[in-house]
Image (spheres, grey):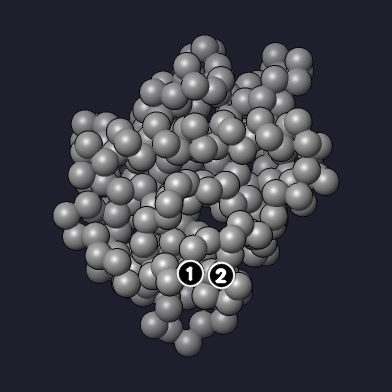
Amino acid sequence: MTTTLHQSDLDLPLLHRGKVRDVYGLPNNELLIVASDRLSAFDVVLPDPIPGKGEILCQMSNFWFAQTATLQPNHLSATPLASVLPAGTDLALYAKRSVVAKKLKALPVEAIARGYLIGSGWKDYQRTGAVCGIALPAGLRQAEVLPEPIFTPSTKAAVGDHDENIGFDRVVELIGGELAEAVRTATLKIYRFAAAYAAERGILIADTKLEFGLDENGALIVMDEMLTPDSSRFWPADQYQIGISPPSYDKQFVRDYLETLDWNKTAPGPRVPVEVIGATRAKYAEALLKLTGIVA
């Protein structure tokens, strides 16, 4: 049964409440991460949740973490969820939307891989002919596949602020050359694997955002979420067209609706109509089924 959770309230130390996830402190250098049903767009948390979205995000992330574990270590812990929830907590409400994870030192960059020219990358290309300082061939059209996937990092904005695209040189300044190279390599490796996997199931992954952290030994670990409709653009392969923003399985559906409003993309966000909420949830659920076989 689908559950709805706009904001968690557990008797544990709350360390961070993000756009979607609530993070609690646990003993033994671990965290409890709860994926709520909050929806953010243009870096603003909208007032209306998408019922069950957190469950879909969590199950999809866990699927990809398992699929890519041999490519890159991830943050998941073996500690059972039920063993860390406070007494009296409704396990059914948290079971599909929560994970116990290792506590890491988060890197201050968003690691983004792009395989298609869309979103802020398309806007950058129209202005400069490049994306994050990476020169691209002339004459590319909106949503066109790139000659090869590119690493286009951004800053990690606080809630209510906007991420800013940065060049690789800036990443080197922030975290050092060796680590920057490792993040770029891991990001593109994961993207290429996932894009090939999804394409076999009728979904094009236009781009995706990953986050990384370091463990106590300095090892690079992929964390937070992975290849979800909130962190990626998923397009149905049979409806893909160059020259337009293709229909999608992700929150681009909500973004497209918001673009029709007279809204300056700053908080507070506008209310989202019931029909947009329902259609968005259906998109998320369809992506989960196509990619993982899980029914939401």
Specify the label residue 103 is tagged with: none
Q: Nearer the viewer, mark 2 or mark 1?
A: 1
Q: Nearer the viewer, residue 242 or 92?
A: 242
Amino acid on which the number 2 mark rests in the picture: Gly
Q: Residue at x 20, y 44 (%)?
A: 202
User: Mark 2 or mark 1, which has the lower sequence index?
Assistant: 2
In the displayed structure, 240 sits above or below 228; it is below
Mark 1 residue crowding within 10 angstroms, few (<14) / some (14–19) / many (20+): few
Q: Quadrant of residue 253?
A: bottom left
Q: Residue at x 45, y 38 (%)?
A: 191
Mark 2 residue crowding within 10 angstroms, few (<14) / some (14–19) / many (20+): some
Specify the label residue 138 is tagged with: 1
Q: Position of residue 54 (x, y in %)?
A: 41, 43
Q: How many marks?
A: 2
| 173 with respect to 279 (left or right) | right
In the displayed structure, 78 sits above or below 65; it is above
Amino acid on which the number 1 mark rests in the picture: Ala
Quarter of the image that includes the C terminus: top left
Q: Gap between marks 2 and 1, in whole Å?
A: 7 Å
Q: Is residue 122 visible in the rendered structure shown here?
A: yes
Q: Residue at x 71, y 37 (%)?
A: 180
Task: Say which residue label 2 marks.
Answer: 129
Q: Residue furthest bottom?
A: 262
Q: Is residue 157 visible in the rendered structure shown here?
A: no
Do the CB atoms of the residues marked 2 and 1 lie less than 8 Å apart?
Answer: yes
Quarter of the image that includes the N terminus: top left
Q: Position of residue 235 (x, y in %)?
A: 29, 54
Q: Nearer the viewer, residue 30 or 87?
A: 30
